[in-house]
Amino acid sequence: MRKKTFVVLLALCMLLMSVCPVGALAEGNESRIVTRGLAGCDSWLTYNPTDQAYYLYGQCDGEEGEYKTFVLTLYKQVGSSWQFIDSAITSGEERQLVIYEKVNATLTSGYYKIQMSITTPTNYGSGPNYFTI
């Protein structure tokens, strides 16, 4: 009976530890806890009539001083699958990371997806945006 109770309590402790915020880090000389994280990301497929070209444009906000890597990947729907077209990447410790990069392909009419991903030492996030040309 004791062994079974101990195993249940141990499992419960492990479960509780797994839901604690991973991004909580002690910082500075004080004993405060700072949760580091991402404020938000967004992306667009823009057309520049001067260049007559499409651009991947995206921005991501986070905590200044925390190293971030921001990636935009462009896909075109072909049948029931997504075909890779182009990607852009930036990284740094600024509060806001911005990508504005010319697409290295000629885009024809169709349904496109930009997959955004952001990685920090304490967080990871990704999500798509869809566009029709």
Image: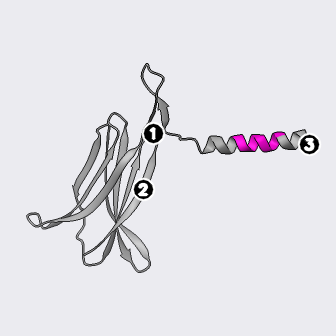
Structural distance between the alpha carbons of marks 3 and 1: 43 Å
Q: Amino acid at mark 2?
A: Ser
Q: Amino acid at mark 3?
A: Met
Q: Residue at x 44, y 26 (%)?
A: 27
Q: Is residue 8 magenta?
A: yes
Mark 1 in CB contact with mark 2 (< 8 angstroms): no
Residue 70, horizontal then vertical, whole percent: 35, 49
Q: Main secondary structure of the magenta part?
A: helix
* Residue 20: quarter of image: top right
Q: Residue at x 91, y 42 (%)?
A: 1
Q: Residue at x 81, y 42 (%)?
A: 7
Disc 3 designates what residue? Answer: 1
Specify which label sits upstream in the sequence, 3 or 1: 3
Structural distance between the alpha carbons of marks 2 and 3: 46 Å
Disc 1 designates what residue? Answer: 121
Disc 2 designates what residue? Answer: 126
Q: Quadrant of the C terminus?
A: bottom left
* Residue 109 horizontal side relative to residue 113, left or right: left
- Report the residue that reaches farthest toward the bottom: 79
Residue 4, horizontal then vertical, whole percent: 86, 44
